Image (cartoon, rainbow, N blue to C red):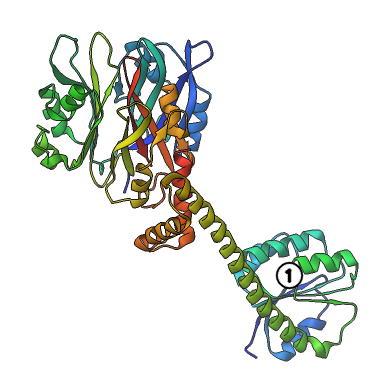
Amino acid sequence: MNKLNVLLIEQDPNISLLENELKEIGFIYLKTQYDSTFLRLVTDIAPNIIIFNLDICSNTLFSDLKTLNQQSALPIIIFTRDGHVGTIELAIKADVCALIVGDFEQKRLASIINVAMARFKHQQVLKTALEEACAKLEDRKLIDRAKAILIKTQNFSEDEAYHTLRKLAMDRNISLGEMAKNVLAMSELFK
Amino acid sequence: MKTFIKVTEIWVPDKQRTHLEFGSGLYGGLIEFKAASEQQQFAYNEGLPGKAWAEGRPLVLKEFEQSYFKRTAAAKAVGLTCGIAIPVFSGDFLLAVVVFLCADDEHHAGAIEVWSNQHSSEQSLTVIDGYYGSLHHFEQISRDISVAKDQGLAGLAWAQGLPVLIDDISKADGFIRANDAKQAGITMGIGIPVSDNLSASYIMTFLSAKATPLAKRIQIWVPDLQGEQLICLEGYSKKPNELAQLFETTTVTKGVGALGRVWLTGMPVITGDHELDYNPELISLSSMLAIPVIEQGRLKAIVSFLF
């Protein structure tokens, strides 16, 4: 495995269990505590993975993780003593790759990181596929609405409306969805 | 690429019809100026819209400082330096005032002129007001000439009582300032009859260069021979726009859609996304200003500026 750039967030800076293991594995890491500068710190140091070691996971933490996920998703591992159902649900919603509750064996850290990285990659593939499917569905709706406008205003058949839309899109070298947006915008102007 | 019209507003009479209040506007990114404008009211003969109402003719105000302009500080803060007010009358009664605000810009080429015969007995038009930006030589020439009915852009619009659009104005036979326009970089012009009252006729001309178009597309709509529907007489844009052309093949019924409402009410309208910055590179047209041309209480045409 390539050497990862790890951001290690420890609740107690005097605890060095994870830090020692990261050193042992040979990862580059920055150890710090969680505070309001967390998101800015992530932007500044651009880690490959973030590992938390916290007794309790706050709502603010999950809110920050959600924001991070929307801005620039990263693999997240949380070691915690907080095994409440609510915490687990929030962790899943924030796309946390691994939530390790209770004590853990030091030697397992490398495999936990490996699994988290693999899971993150898989999550990203699924997320991209979902976004593409949603975009296609949205395009489909836009195209149908644009066709309906052309049918109504130009007395076109459905086929004629589709071919007109396609020709306009090809002439402009843009997608059918983009062209449909233009037809809708034009129709809005005359509404 | 920029346009020299930065702000477009419609001011409408309030319930008592004694003051003008904010109707709608296109401000691009000038949010603070928009906020300052929305709360404004103008009495008869007050401010630029009120003055245009009182004088019964289009006005061009080239200097806001020490003038009757009411929003000088807000305009100055966003670089607006010149205003044009076009009153829309039906007979003696004001329906609305359209205001354009411009910013001085060294790089633009364009002019907005008000032509009039000053007195109904006179058979020629001269420039009585105008905004020429940096086109000082062209302004000098324009202010020195007079045009007869049917002559030049303003004369043609006057004779026909209809908007007239000339695409390549520097090559147009009927445009007597063709050479001067070419030198000034002006390529397109539209003449619009406004405020045709008993004492005098007024024609607005908008002249623009390719680099700083008036709008992404300009259309002229007129009632058909039966007066039952509006048809698009002409559509113009710098680049061909098949989508706009497609919509120009449709007919408009009175009261239906934005243009149908202009026909029904005689009121100018602004539609579309009011917040967007003008961006001529965008394919989609994001907003429209439609101005009615009214003669003796009847709609003669609608000019729509698509941004």
In the image: residue B269, left or right of residue B3:
right
Quickly name the residue at label 1: A95
Residue in front for this viewpoint, B3 or B235: B235
In the image: residue B173, left or right of residue B113:
left
Query: Tag 1: residue type?
Result: Asp
- Rendering coords of residue A32 (x, y %): 73, 71
Tell me if residue A22 comes above or below residue A161 in the rendering: below
* Quadrant position of residue B154: top left
Tell me if residue B175 comes above or below residue A134 in the rendering: above
- Rendering coords of residue A93 (x, y %): 76, 65
Residue at image location 11% in from the left, 37% down from the top? B178
Tell me if I can see residue A103 in this picture. yes
Residue in front for this viewpoint, A161 or A20: A161
Tell me if residue B110 comes above or below residue A126 in the rendering: above
- Mark 1 belongs to which subunit? A
* Quadrant position of residue B115: top left
- Rendering coords of residue B302 (x, y %): 34, 30
Residue at image location 36% in from the left, 28% down from the top? B291
- Rendering coords of residue A76 (x, y %): 73, 74
